[in-house]
Image: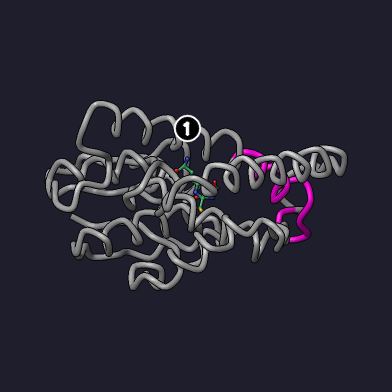
Amino acid sequence: MKLYDYPAGPNPRRVRIFLAEKGVEVPLEHVDIVKREQKMPDFLAKNPIGSIPVLELDDGTCISESVAICRYFEELHPEPPLFGRTPVEKAMIEMWLRRVELNFMVPIGMVWIHGHPLTARLIKQIPEAAEQNRKRVHMGYKLLDDQLSAHEFVAGDDYSVVDAILLASLDFANGLVGVPYDQDLTHLKRWHDTVSARPSASA
Ligand SMILES: N[C@@H](CCC(=O)N[C@@H](CS)C(=O)NCC(=O)O)C(=O)O
């Protein structure tokens, strides 16, 4: 088994954080997305979307999508449970996974694609799209801050896959994309400090 990875990419980092929380080590293979190696025919045969992470199993099966890869490892290594234990916990985690993806990561991706100089060569950028989505990112931050005012972690009172996914996405938004959250979102900041202090954050 190997995980196709790129150190600076937020989506492979999601999986590395998740694996660190599980205490599982998987060999990594570097795919240089700046050199567009993910769009080469060999790689497209593994993931026709041409993105990483991809987990390649020993029988050649390839699993892409960071959350799907995390789910696979949850089945292999159920402890500690990061996708919930009870029906309600599982549903809350699924709900927050979708909220983080749709209300936070999608707009961040749009700001990245339409507003960042590093992606300007890839598409014809629409500055208004970047601006609109910058607002949506801030709405996402507020949604998270409200949730974290009542819960220690995003999907409840236990650390879950949602925290791994959000940490990688939020660090990308705060760093490379340049859309930091307002420091007066104190609950989000408290959560960010807490999860950043876990050993898995350095994965
Ligand atoms: N929804 C996918 C997103 C994967 C993704 O966009 N990966 C980025 C790296 S962080 C990538 O490969 N970008 C290069 C490209 O799409 O060409 C996931 O969760 O794995």
Q: Position of residue 100 (x, y in %)?
A: 52, 40
The location of residue 123, given as percent across then percent down, is 74, 43
In the rendered image, residue 7 lying in the magenta stretch gets the answer no
Question: Looking at the picture, how far across and down is residue 137, in whole percent?
Answer: 69, 44
Along the line of sight, the residue nearer the viewer: 170 or 52:
170
The residue that mark 1 highlights is 98
Residue at 53 percent of width and 63 percent of height = 190
Give the side of residue 26 with respect to residue 94, left or right.
Answer: left
Q: Residue furthest right?
A: 128
The image position of residue 139, as x and y in percent, is: 70, 40
Magenta range: 106-119
- Give the residue displayed 21% in from the left and 31% down from the top: 86
Where 62 falls versus 199 (above or below)?
A: above
In which quadrant of the rendered image does the C terminus lie? Answer: bottom left
Q: 144 or 62, which lies in front? A: 144
Amino acid type, callout 1: Arg
Q: Is 122 situated above or below 6?
A: above
Q: Quadrant of the N terminus?
A: bottom left
Observer-nearest of 13 and 126: 13
Quarter assignment of residue 170? bottom right
> Against 185, is 146 above or below?
above
Side (left or right) of 28 relative to 74:
right
Left or right, 183 with reference to 144: right
Residue, x 44% and y 37% (percent of image)?
A: 97
Dot 1 alpha-carbon crowd within 10 angstroms: few under 14, some 14 to 19, many 20 or more = some
